[in-house]
Amino acid sequence: MARITKDQCLDDLKLRILSTDLSPGSDLDETSLAEHYEISRTPMREVLHRLAGAGYITTAENRGAKVASMDIGTMRTFFQTAPMVYANIASLAAEARTAPQLDALKDAQLAFVKATGAQDAQAAALANHRFHAVVGEMAHNPYLVASLDRLLIDHTRLSQRFYRPSNADEKQRIVKASDQHDALITAIEAHESALAIDLSLQHWDLSRDRMERYVRPDPLPVDVVSLKDRRNAI
Amino acid sequence: MARITKDQCLDDLKLRILSTDLSPGSDLDETSLAEHYEISRTPMREVLHRLAGAGYITTAENRGAKVASMDIGTMRTFFQTAPMVYANIASLAAEARTAPQLDALKDAQLAFVKATGAQDAQAAALANHRFHAVVGEMAHNPYLVASLDRLLIDHTRLSQRFYRPSNADEKQRIVKASDQHDALITAIEAHESALAIDLSLQHWDLSRDRMERYVRPDPLPVDVVSLKDRRNAI
DNA sequence: TGTATACTTCTTGTATACAAATCTGAGTCG
DNA sequence: CGACTCAGATTTGTATACAAGAAGTATACA
């Protein structure tokens, strides 16, 4: 890794965590990370503390850092909390958005469309993350945004595989999600906060269905023959 | 300041910020802080980054740390956001609280009663902070708690002067707040989440009235004589 | 063979020296 | 008189050496 700044290191680690390149619960060794980014341990530790503050990782005294885990208990609260926060954020965004923020939102949506078109699942998930983070900025509510940011971390990690459709139905869902983004942009631009709430709840329903399928996927086919084959192969 | 650990330093700074001993917006010099706590700058900087992550302070590259400000814009969103978050947290707390957490809650309320009885406004505000932080822990919802914690920082700073009643009416309000705490404890203990929502909204209404009075205090009496006296005094 | 314990190794935490950036104020020029 | 510049002082950021703690390993003993 070429020599980079502390901020770039921070952003890179965020992306690696969001894309589950660094998987939930995995250990982070500050020495090797510092070597990788070619900075010394002092600023590396600062980056890790920032990540911990933002909920990307957890740290334990004398025990180093771990990527924030995604246990089943937190997932439950995730599904419980997300719609309320998303809807409120969307409503506030419609009220308080500025013109430059609207540009940034359209830009994120452009990246999202491009990534889904190219079947680049990881880029799509990250563009989706950026889209919703910009909506969060628009809300101008530092209190709620703290919740939103934490929700988005897990949302993005959960949705890593969504944007690689394996059939026509899944493809259709991605198109629908993109349409919902466009509709949300229009609502926010027009300051229509009630509509923004409705749209973000619809958008959430779509996401939830896909995420639940990921958390609880279709069971593997019970196929005695292939099981036997596998046993033979050992 | 006697030699202390990093965690104690962190807690002490939190308390000093919550009690507005360190006033919003004031500069924090890491060198003098490190000397004060008798630790070197490296762990001191770590503490500052933790505080920044939790929303107590803000940091700017090469520009040092400041105690988080309380500008009028954020206050608006504070009043907008707090009831929703408090109500949801209370509801979740009633569902998910554990027995030890209930003990901690009763303990915090005991401290609150004691502090208000002793007319110790600062201790009362901090005990109130601890009370609501424990309710937050009970909710077992890391996403929403991120919002709650940030709200409580500003709530506590705003309410610093509440618990020093200047007349019978204000005294009555403090008794009412304490009664509401007791009722909330009972509701949470009985797993009555709907009741917990109602109670926390009532509790919020009481707080809000007092805080708005603080933000927008009664206008000074227009008293020409005393104005003249003041002019003479210059 | 299983457990305990001391020793080694590896990782994290702290102090300090040095580098880089920002701030301050005196002096200069238009 | 005001704006600009540049040196000095102050403050923040980084690297590195050393200390302290945790984890792993080998050996002794039951």
Image: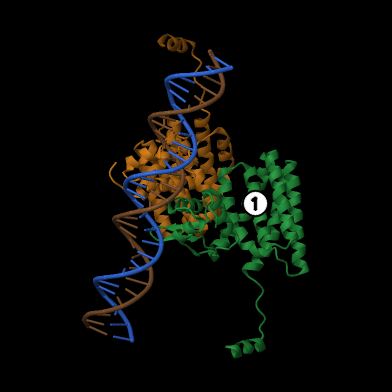
Chain colours: A green, B orange, C blue, D brown
In the rendered image, residue B139, in percent from the top left (x then y), is placed at 51, 55
Q: Is residue A27 left or right of residue C13?
A: right
A46 or B116, which lies in front? A46
Chain holding disc 1:
A
At 75% across and 60% down in the image, what residue appears? Answer: A117
Relative vertical location of residue B19 with respect to residue D30 in this rendering, above or below: above
Q: Mark 1 points at which residue?
A: A130
Q: Could you tell me residue A9's position as x and y percent?
A: 53, 53
How many residues crowd around disc 1 within 10 Å: few (fewer than 14), some, or many (20 or more)?
Answer: many
Q: Where is residue A104 in the image (x, y as percent from the top left)?
A: 69, 45
Question: Which percent across, then down, holds residue B59?
Answer: 49, 41
Look at the image and tell me in which quarter the C terminus of chain B lies.
Answer: top left
Disc 1 marks a residue whose amino acid type is Arg
Quarter of the image that includes the N terminus of chain B: top left
At a point 53% along the width and 49% down the height, the residue shown is A5
- Write down the quadrant of residue B172 in the picture: top left
Front one among B40 and B86 = B40
Mark 1 lies on a secondary structure that is: helix
Residue A234 visible within the image: yes
Q: Can residue B182 be seen in this view?
A: no
